[in-house]
Amino acid sequence: MSNKEFYVITWGGLRGALGLTLALMVGTDTKLDFRLRELTLFYMAGLATLTLLVNGTTCKHLCIAINLIENPPIKQKLLKNAKKQLLLSCDDKIEKLSEDKYLNLADWKEVKELIG
């Protein structure tokens, strides 16, 4: 396991699942005071929710920050080619639109600069 994977596993963790399990065990133990059982469940549920909200929503940003997810070279080439085809298609469409009698007053040079 690499260091990057270790960071993600540590950050992701069990999201309070183990703590909730233990709190439920305390909550069902009738030998303990009712208030202690109630508070244990309340605080552990709060911590589990907090870890879900904080760790769960920031895990993607962690993966991006440590550069764990990289696009393979073939995907990079496919994206580059798709962008190139899209720009060519836009140029063709702009040419057709610029010849339209209702749109010929538009500043097509500025449109091309904005796209390209």
Image (cartoon, rainbow, N blue to C red):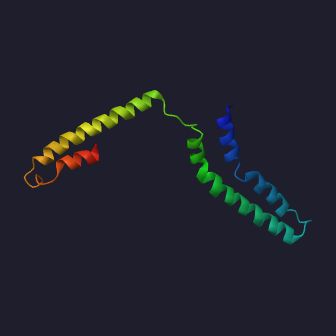
Outermost residue on the top side: it is 74
Say which residue appears at 23% left-offset and 39% top-offset.
89
Apparent side of residue 109 relative to residue 28 in the rendered image (left or right): left
Image quadrant for the N terminus?
Answer: top right
Tell me if residue 115 comes above or below residue 32 in the rendering.
above
How many circles with numbers are drawn on the protein?
0
The percent coordinates of residue 34 (x first, y second) are 86, 71
The percent coordinates of residue 105 (x first, y second) are 11, 54
Say which residue appears at 24% left-offset and 37% top-offset.
88
Tell me if residue 61 comes above or below residue 69 in the rendering.
below
Say which residue appears at 67% left-offset and 32% top-offset.
2
The percent coordinates of residue 75 (x first, y second) are 43, 31
Image quadrant for the C terminus?
Answer: top left
Q: Residue 95 or 107: which is nearer the viewer?
A: 107
Apparent side of residue 59 relative to residue 113 in the rendered image (left or right): right
Q: Residue 5 or 65: which is nearer the viewer?
A: 65
